[in-house]
Amino acid sequence: MKKTFLRAAFCLSLAATATTVVFSCSNNDDDTTETPTQTIDPNKFEGTITKGNVVTLDATKTYKLTGKLLVEGGATLIIPAGTKIVANEGANYLIVDRNAKIFINGTATAPVVFEGAINSPGSWGGLVVLGNAPSNRSAAGTSTSELGELTYGGTAKDDNSGSIQYVIIKNSGFKYNPSKEFNGLSLFGVGSGTKVSYVSVVDGADDGVEFFGGNVNADHILVLGVGDDSVDWTEGWQGTADYIYAARKKEYFNAAEPGNRGIEADTQDTDPNTTFGNGASNPTIKNATFLGNVKGTESQAMKIRAGSQGQFDNIVLSNFSTGIDFETDRTLAWFQAGSYVKNVRFESIGTNIKGKNTAGTSVDLTAAVTVNANATGAGNGSSLPDWAKGWSGVSAFTAADAGN
């Protein structure tokens, strides 16, 4: 009786707001085959897309992100090509939980656009995806996300959270407090079954793209003018990133957050032997260009530390005070043991290579890096590659546009 009453009350409540939500209700308390449908009011794009629902947005409408929108486990959100989502100022963000799926189906001629109602870095949150692939924070491979405070991770390295392609994310990086802020795209324990391709993060206040463990692969990533690191990883990420063009912007040269590193690489596990989850971070980074300027204390093209490993090939680094900065014993041991940094081109770099062990003693890592003055990086040296033009809204960019 109680269940029937609550169901009836729920349906009547939804009927009263039919312009906002449509939900399929059944009078059969034991009906386990119903497939409810839920739609969202474009003028109040917030709340929860609940388990079992599939929501498809309408590309002819502009969606106003007015709060947190959660895609619950077992639910699906589909965003068609050409859809525009405008976020109000504040902690407004889109988060996809474990066992949920998001399909951002942008195209080269009609990308999906997320932007702030206020055209300013950090005016809104960002896009957050949680999967079931391992984090090395615990023996179970799980942890709690700093954004959304939900459980992520597990043991499913090939987990599938959907696909994200041809999307532009502007003005992200809202700051909760001095030590906690959103990134443009945050991937927590996302598995290799998820597609991440042709993503642009522009004018954000924190990192462009950050990987928290997982095994997801990404390609064709454009990051311009973010306040912190362009690409960041930790917790045992072991995917690939192929074709990255990332740069500071000279218009922020004198800003409080002018931008930091091109790459910040960590492992940050709780086990000193890195036996949890995937173990140490060990991604493969290929065909990448990182442009900076000398502003700030973290003018480093690539900072690799805290046990992170990695394999790098065809990299262009330009305009930073430091090119590659290796730190901590476990990181140094990895890069001294093999040829893992190949075909690197340094342009206008103050110090090309630095190394320091855990005790703080300088170590010569020059032999760990193979230099190639003809490396092409993302495809066109320090200039914007062809694959980044058009769909991203950017037609040209050079090292001069990054500042110095």
Image: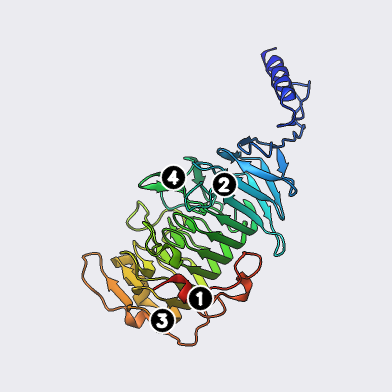
Q: For numbered disc 2, what is the local secondary structure?
A: loop
Mark number displayed over residue 146: 4
Number of other residues with Cα within 10 Å of mark 4, as a class: few under 14, some 14 to 19, many 20 or more:
few
- The answer to whether residue 138 is seen in the rendering is no
Q: Locate the N terminus by quadrant.
A: top right
Measure the alpha-carbon separation of dots 1 and 3. 15 Å
Q: Disc 4 and disc 3: Cα gap in Å?
A: 35 Å
Label 1 and label 2: CA atoms lie apart by: 28 Å
Q: Which label's residue is closer to the chain start, 1 or 2?
A: 2
Is 51 located above or below residue 189 in the figure? Answer: above
Kind of residue indicated by mark 1: Thr
Name above or below for residue 380 compared with residue 4.
below
Q: Secondary structure at mark 4?
A: loop
Question: Which residue is tagged 1?
Answer: 398
Mark number, residue 69: none
Three-letter amino acid code at the position of disc 3: Phe
**In front here: 61 or 328?**
61
